[in-house]
Amino acid sequence: QVHVVESGGGLVQAGGSLRLACATSGITFSINAWGGYRQAPGRQRGLVAIIGSSGDKNYADSVKGRFPISGDNAKNTVYLHMNSLKTGDTSVYYCRVEYGTGCFEYDSWGRGTQVTVSS
């Protein structure tokens, strides 16, 4: 059974930092990409950052230069380092893992972790 678990959310003041972790287990296929997404109340879920299996990275314009993403293959864990946080970053943050190959491609989502940035 595949498990995707986010951790590290919480309450932080504007300008502060948090590190979110996304840990996976139970995936027997090759992992193709790890993505961090967020959803604020009343808004659609959107991509924050993504890291591919080859280490390529992409970021939403709103977080470029503030939220570097990194991976630890040995721990099957990806980290989103959130710096210079703004009140507008307040959201539930989700991790999505894409895996598989050819006709057998899948994705799994975590349940999310709340990040609240106070002014």
Image (cartoon, grey):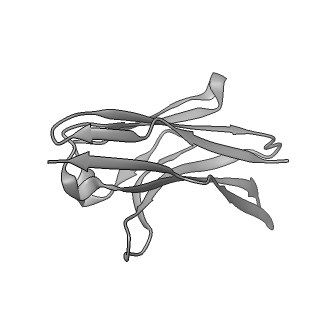
Q: Is residue 33 above or below residue 83?
A: below
Which image quadrant for residue 109? bottom right
* Residue 86 percent coordinates (x, y): 19, 49
Which is more toward the observer, 102 or 87?
A: 87
Which image quadrant for residue 88? bottom left
Q: Is residue 16 above or below residue 58?
A: above
Q: Is residue 31 above or below residue 23?
A: below
Image position of 86 (left or right of 80): left
Residue drawn at (56%, 42%) of the image: 6
Image position of 88 (left or right of 44): left
* Residue 1 percent coordinates (x, y): 85, 47
Residue drawn at (37%, 75%) of the image: 43
Image position of 108 (left or right of 57): right
Image position of 116 (left or right of 118): right
* Residue 49 percent coordinates (x, y): 40, 51
Which is more toward the observer, 24 or 64?
A: 24
Residue drawn at (54%, 52%) of the image: 112
* Residue 92 percent coordinates (x, y): 44, 56
Q: Is residue 3 above or below residue 87?
A: above
Looking at the rendered structure, the number of numbered marks drawn on it comes to: 0
Residue drawn at (15%, 38%) of the image: 15
